[in-house]
Amino acid sequence: MIEFLKENWEIFFGFITSIGAFFGGRKLKRADEKKATSEALETMQKTYDTFVQDFRERYTEVKEELKQYREEQLQLRGEVIQLRSENNDLRKELKDWETKYTKLKKEFDIYKKEN
């Protein structure tokens, strides 16, 4: 048997080396897969962090705009209330002037008929 091994040692050595290479390659393949998965997760995390940061900035901008619009709305409501009040006052004044005009027109017509 020893002589058989001496004569065929190259074949046995090649066979054992092939088995070692197979398991070593398998181990390297798994390590590469883990590394690729890890890199993919890191990339996804960075993308998510960027998205969250951008979303926060936009949310803050929208909140500020909404606050500004609410303040403008309150100011405009006050102006509308003031304009309505002025409009009502002007309508009353217009009615008073119409009444005075009608009264003066009647007096003028009477005066015109008399003279």
Image (spheres, grey):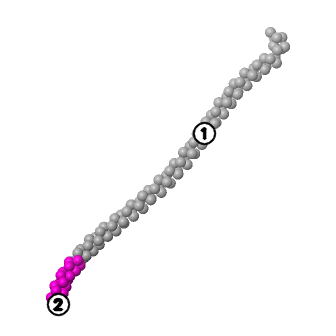
Q: Is residue 106 above or below residue 70?
A: below
Could you say where residue 103 lies in the image, as x and y percent from the top left? 18, 81
The mark nearer the N terminus, 2 or 1, is 1
Tell me which amino acid carries mark 2.
Answer: Asn
Between the residue at mark 2 and the residue at mark 1, the CA separation in whole angstroms equals 107 Å
Look at the image and tell me whether residue 100 can be seen. no
Assign the magenta stretch its main secondary structure.
helix
Range drawn in magenta: 97-115
| Residue 24 visible from this viewpoint | yes
**Looking at the picture, how far across and down is residue 36, in whole percent?**
63, 36
Against 34, residue 90 (above or below) is below
Is residue 109 shown in magenta?
Answer: yes
Circle 1 sits in a helix, a strand or a loop, which is it?
helix
Q: Where does residue 107 sit, x and y in percent of width and height?
A: 17, 84
The residue that disc 1 covers is: 40
Asked if the stretch drawn in magenta spans residue 89, the answer is no
Residue density around tag 1, few if under 14, some if 14–19, many if 20 or more, within 10 Å: few
Residue at image position (32%, 70%) is 83
Please give left or right for residue 34 compared with residue 100 in the image.
Answer: right
For label 2, the residue is 115
Provide residue 78's location: percent of width, then percent of height.
Answer: 33, 67
- 38 on left or right of 68: right
Q: Name the mark on residue 55.
A: none
22 lies above or below 60: above
Look at the image and tell me in which quarter the C terminus lies. Answer: bottom left
Q: Nearer the viewer, residue 54 or 3?
A: 54
Task: From the viewer's side, name the closer residue of 92 and 79.
Answer: 92
